[in-house]
Image (cartoon, grey):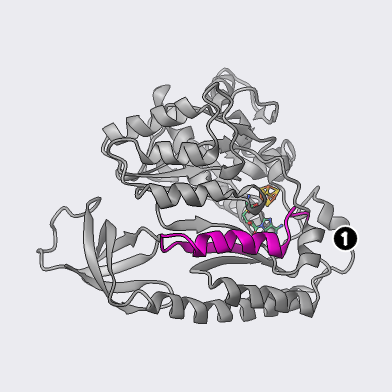
Amino acid sequence: MNVHDSEKVIGTLMDKGYGQVETPEEADLVLYNTCSIRDKAEQKVFSRLQEFKRHNKGKTFGVLGCVAQQEGERIFEKAPHVSLVCGSASYNHLPQLLVQLETGNRRVTGLSLDTEDTFDTPMTRRDNPHRAYITIIEGCDKACAYCVVPYTRGPERSRASESVLAEARQLAELGYSEIQLLGQNVNSYRDPSAAAFTFAQLLDAVGRVPGIRRVRFTTSHPRDFGKDIIDAMDENPNLCNQVHLPVQSGSNHVLAAMQRLYTREDYMRRIEWMKNSRRNIAITTDIIVGFPGESERDFDQTLALLEEVEYDSIFSFKYSPRPNTPALGLDDHIPDGEKGRRLTILQEKQRGIQLRRNAEYIGNIEEVMVEGFNKATGQWIGRTSQHKTLNFTTAQPAGQPLTGTYLSVRVLRAGPNSLVGEAV
Ligand code: SAH
Ligand code: SF4
């Protein structure tokens, strides 16, 4: 989401006549987009800002994104060389903020979360010419006890279905064949227009735009995940075989303390829909270990859930206390060493599951979208519908313009993180 926000910011500024340069050294204006989902990401921001300062005297610096929204004017105290601070809900005001700087203001901010219009800019400077992101919903109305997103990205607001579809058609005309729909919780989507599309209907409609061959979506919230999404995937071959459904924990006690609004049983019902689908759906998730009060038994239930679902991959994190969040006030915070121990055990277990899951693909012929060529290994890099990396060789000479095309590849070997094969 942050990558795509940056694309939109760059597009908006280029439309106003700004030019993009390759390195911060060449720039007169440096805008640094930031993440505050975990403390480590946030700390990195301030050390990077110090580095910028040392190497880039006489430039204008701005901080964007969630750290900007969260810290606001405090950033000017911590990093006095910064003169612009702007959260994601105010990016459409960036051109005016920059004019204010140019006309002599020393410090400007865009921190309002009072967002009538979504950041719905047609000006996007995309780096990849084949796969593109489209934002369909911004912000979040949930209140998970550990999470800063509702405070940094503001309330949920959906984009009109026609606007989404117009962007998809425009991308198809430009030669894009893959689209990824984005939102904190894409499946909480509520069409504000008279068309009143559900998320599943919107997904299906994007998958039917002529020229679009692949559609993905992230992230889905389990509470709002309806069976109609799986039904749409069953019906529409252009919807990719991939669902990212963050569970966070396998323990009902921890899920309740997290205020996730579903139980393990609710979650498993959704997994069953996917397993019963005609499609071979790759399922991925996010997990937090060491949430306050997580006992050894709770943690064991998360390990058991990994086995039960057999995820294709997971993103796993140590619980990180965040400013303003309710979890800060909970008792029984877990020591960092113990969080680290649990994370290692979890990741080891998942590695075994991934080896097993990926081995099931050996012998299959999979369609890949070619993403590039790896000179070091002499292999092409492909991506399957399940979003797995499938590195492959082909009889065609290297240097052929294969990137962005679709090929059939036989899977010959499998590792925990990728597959290896040859084009057929
Ligand atoms: N809206 C999505 C997730 C967005 S944040 C959802 O509800 O599933 C992405 C991931 O970051 C979360 O799924 C969670 O696993 C992780 N995360 C968020 N806050 C965190 C925190 N305080 N500590 C550790 N991990 C966190
Ligand atoms: Fe954060 Fe929960 Fe909203 Fe996801 S649903 S962004 S974890 S508050």
Q: Position of residue 206 (x, y in %)?
A: 40, 37
Decide if residue 66 is in sight here. Answer: yes
Q: Position of residue 350 (x, y in %)?
A: 55, 76
Decide if residue 375 is in sight here. Answer: no
Q: Verify whether residue 270 appears in magenta.
A: yes
Q: Image quadrant of residue 115? A: top right
402 or 324: nearer the viewer: 402
328 or 246: nearer the viewer: 246
Q: Position of residue 252 (x, y in %)?
A: 77, 66
Q: Residue at x 66, y 29 (%)?
A: 109
Mark 1 Cα-neighbour bin, 10 Å: few <14, some 14–19, many ≥20 = few
Q: Verify whether residue 234 appears in magenta.
A: no
Q: Which residues are magenta?
A: 259-286
198 or 379: nearer the viewer: 198
Q: Amino acid at mark 1?
A: Leu
**Is label 1's Cβ within 8 Å of ligand 1?**
no
Quick one: SS at disc 1? Answer: loop
Q: Residue at x 69, y 36 (%)?
A: 154
Please give left or right for residue 138 compared with residue 277 in the image. Answer: right
Q: Which residue is mark 1?
A: 330
- Residue 376 sits above or below residue 185 on the image: below
Q: Image quadrant of residue 388? A: bottom left
Please give left or right for residue 39 compared with residue 297 in the image. Answer: left
- Residue 424 sits above or below residue 116 on the image: below
Please give left or right for residue 293 compared with residue 393 in the image. Answer: right
Q: Position of residue 364 (x, y in %)?
A: 29, 72
Q: Residue at x 64, y 22 (%)?
A: 116
Q: Residue at x 75, y 78 (%)?
A: 338
